[in-house]
Structures are given as structure tokens and as C-alpha cells.
Image (cartoon, rainbow, N blue to C red):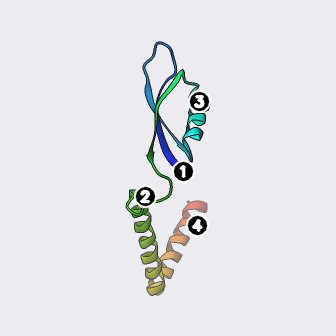
Amino acid sequence: MATWKAEIKTTPTGSAYTVTVEAGASYVAKQEIEHLYNPIYIRNLRQVSSGGSSFTSDGDVSGYLILGAIAVGIWLLVEYWWIVVPIAALVLIGWIYQKFFA
């Protein structure tokens, strides 16, 4: 879906302000604005971004970083399981002791 912006006015004495909605088409964006805000008028309805994902957006980059961190974490668990398993067992024993006996 695309992001749409418009200037609307909701009260006769108030000033206009900008709202943003997500919609696939301009008429859907207008209907959404009318449903949400019940404006006196809608002006300058425009599309500010297209739908779909872009490989240059910050969200995608952070997603790739998280995926890379998970991959490295799995590799470390597999490579050093003989260290991870005893440490995990000690942490589990400490958690059980704290939860039920402390």
C-alpha cells in the first residue's frame, strides 16, 4: 500500500493540518480520511510513498543486521556447544534456585 498525505480542516474555527493514511488508491485514501476525521474539507491529497519494500530503507537494513546476528549466534552455538551447554545448565540451575528456593 502507498502512503497518502492531505491537508484537512475539522472545525470551522480551527486551522488545517496534515494527516497521513495508508491506502492502495487515492479514492480509498479519501474515504479513509473521511471515515477517520470527518473533515470539513480535504485538500492537496497526494501520494508520498509507493507500496512495496525498498532495499535502501532503514527497516530493511536493520532486518538484515538482525538476521546476520541470528546467523552468527546459531553458528556460535553449533561451533562452541561444549561451552554453551554447561553455561546454559548453570544459568538454568541458578534461575530454578532463585525462582523456587530464594
Work out how far the residue at label 3 is from the one at label 2, CA to CA, in angstroms.
30 Å
- Which residue is tagged 2? 59
- Badge 4 is on which residue? 96
Disc 1: which residue: 1
Report, in whole angstroms, how far the alpha carbon at label 3 lies from the one at label 4: 55 Å
Instruction: Name the quadrant of the C terminus.
Output: bottom right
Q: Secondary structure at mark 2?
A: helix
Circle 4 residues within 10 Å: few <14, some 14–19, many ≥20: few
- Label 1 with label 2: CB-CB less than 8 Å: no
Which amino acid is tagged 3?
Glu
Q: List the residue tagged with mark 3.
A: 34
Q: Which residue is found at the position 43% from the left and 81% from the top?
A: 76
Residue 70 in percent (x, y) is at 46, 72
Q: Residue 68 occupies which quadrant of the picture?
A: bottom left
Which one is closest to the eye, mark 4 or mark 2?
Answer: 2
CB within 8 Å, label 4 to label 2: no
- Residues under labels 1 and 2: Cα distance? 16 Å
Residue 58, how many percent across, how many down? Answer: 38, 57
How far is mark 1 from mark 4, CA to CA? 48 Å
Report helix, strand or loop for mark 4: helix
